Image: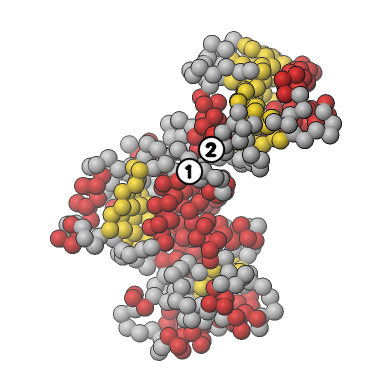
Amino acid sequence: MSLSVKHLLGIRDLQRQDIELIFQTADQFKEVLQRPIKKVPTLRDTTIVNLFFENSTRTRISFELAEKRLGADTINFSASGSSVSKGETLIDTVNNILSMKVDVVVMRHSASGAPHFLSRHIQVPILNAGDGINEHPTQALLDAFSIREKLGSVEGKKVAICGDIMHSRVALSNIYCLKKLGAEVTVVGPPTLIPKHIAAALGVNVSYNIREALQWCDVANVLRIQLERQNTPLFSSLREYSLAYGVNRQLLDSLNKEILIMHPGPINRGVELNSDVADSGQSIILDQVENGVAVRMAALYLLAGKKQDLQ
Amino acid sequence: MKTILNGKQLAITIDRLCHQLIENHLQFENTVLIGLQPRGIYLGDRIYETLKKLLPGTAIHYGKLDITFYRDDYNKGKTLHVPSETNINFSIENKKVVLIDDVLYTGRTIRSALDAMLDFGRPASVELLALIDRRFSRQLPIQPDYTGRTIDALISQKVRVLWEQRDGKDEVILVD
């Protein structure tokens, strides 16, 4: 069995069987990560380059750890301090790196569609680690994997994606992934942070009331407010946003039901999520981080195995 | 298609293999059994159940090991191997390990299994039990310590081991 795609550019391109294959493989990698020796020699003949044109901490570390646990050789590239700052083009940068016999590219870029553009010019598998406000496929996979782990399955579950939907690649990938797996999705946030036609385009429910959305859902995936992507302010102040849409203990206690709390990180504590929720037993944020390594190992394993087909 | 072992012969063979294991390992205090995924576990299950009947009250450790991530051909074929479950919830450190697989052919699976097993600890010794030994087909210097049946088969032929719980009947067949 193999993935139906040559690159993992987004969840939109995947079929449900692909997602289930990734989960099935990640289950076994999760077992590997519980062993005293957490490393397997599977990708020992593979060199992977992590091209990070945009800042990242957890995703880059998670990928690097996944690659090392698979026995691959890794090269880390960050745009700052590289020839990109001298005006080198993306294709030139990548072609130079690939000339050094790299087998897989993991790429993060601030421009939406950058990995798609690259996939038309290079022959090795590309794994999108986040492109602009488009997609972040491995984050969506690890989120759905974490829901499946905690609730037994994703099918039929109600998931509220809360906050800055407009600027979130995590939200878009999550919507694709959850819908493909049979979950019901509601996006909730201020009207200025929810794209106008999202309900018709993606088949999700829209709510502007956080209490109603939390009362409805089994899982709340709370997103970071991405102030760096807002050219003009889309709400009056962080304090006002926190009061209207922040998830806090008082709000959760008033629901009379237990829901799972997720967050892709990094958290703006006290803004979209309060510490008394983020650090509570309801929160599976650290499970998400742990599962991220297993899911990325699975994605790399399945994509690196496709390299023979590409050559 | 030719039958190598019918259901009755398979039961007798498994019984004999269990007695051979008991002869060498007595009460299994320092011995653990590990069935190799995906197909060796059916034989492993059968051996484990038979040993429990033959040695009532004896604690026998039995685990399952998947070797997918240790294969030397993981991306050489048309499709990737999908991993199966590994479940070894005991220590193999300084234990006598008996690896169990249904068919021993090139020896590459066992090579991978040895690698995978060593990530769980350093055993005192390792033995190999195979239901069918396709001799003269080895690509690595690996031989079984316990053999159900030794056969000579052409490279073009396949040995299929059928199990009651999976295939509806117990039988070992040679397919052209």
**Looking at the figure, which quarter contains the C terminus of chain A?**
top left
**B30 or A276: nearer the viewer:** B30
**Mark 2 crowdedness (10 Å alpha carbons): few <14, some 14-19, many ≥20:** some
Mark 1 residue type = Lys
Residue annotated with mark 1: A39
Q: Secondary structure under badge 2?
A: loop
Q: Quadrant of residue B144?
A: top right
Q: Residue at x 51, y 83 (%)?
A: A245
**Going by the image, does A96 lie left or right of A2?**
left
Q: What chain does mark 2 sit on?
A: B
Work out whether A9 lies above or below A225: above
Residue at mark 2 to residue at mark 1: CA–CA distance: 8 Å
Where is residue A232 drawn, in percent x and y? Answer: 32, 83
Where is residue A204 drawn, in percent x and y? Answer: 53, 70
Color scheme of the displayed model = secondary structure
Where is residue B153 drawn, in percent x and y? Answer: 58, 12
Residue A29 in view, yes or no: no
Q: Residue at x 74, y 29 (%)?
A: B28
**A63 or A306: nearer the viewer:** A63
Residue annotated with mark 2: B119
Q: Residue at x 34, y 78 (%)?
A: A230
Q: Are marks 2 and 1 in contact (CB under 8 Å)?
A: yes
Mark 2 residue type = Asp
Q: Residue at x 80, y 33 (%)?
A: B58
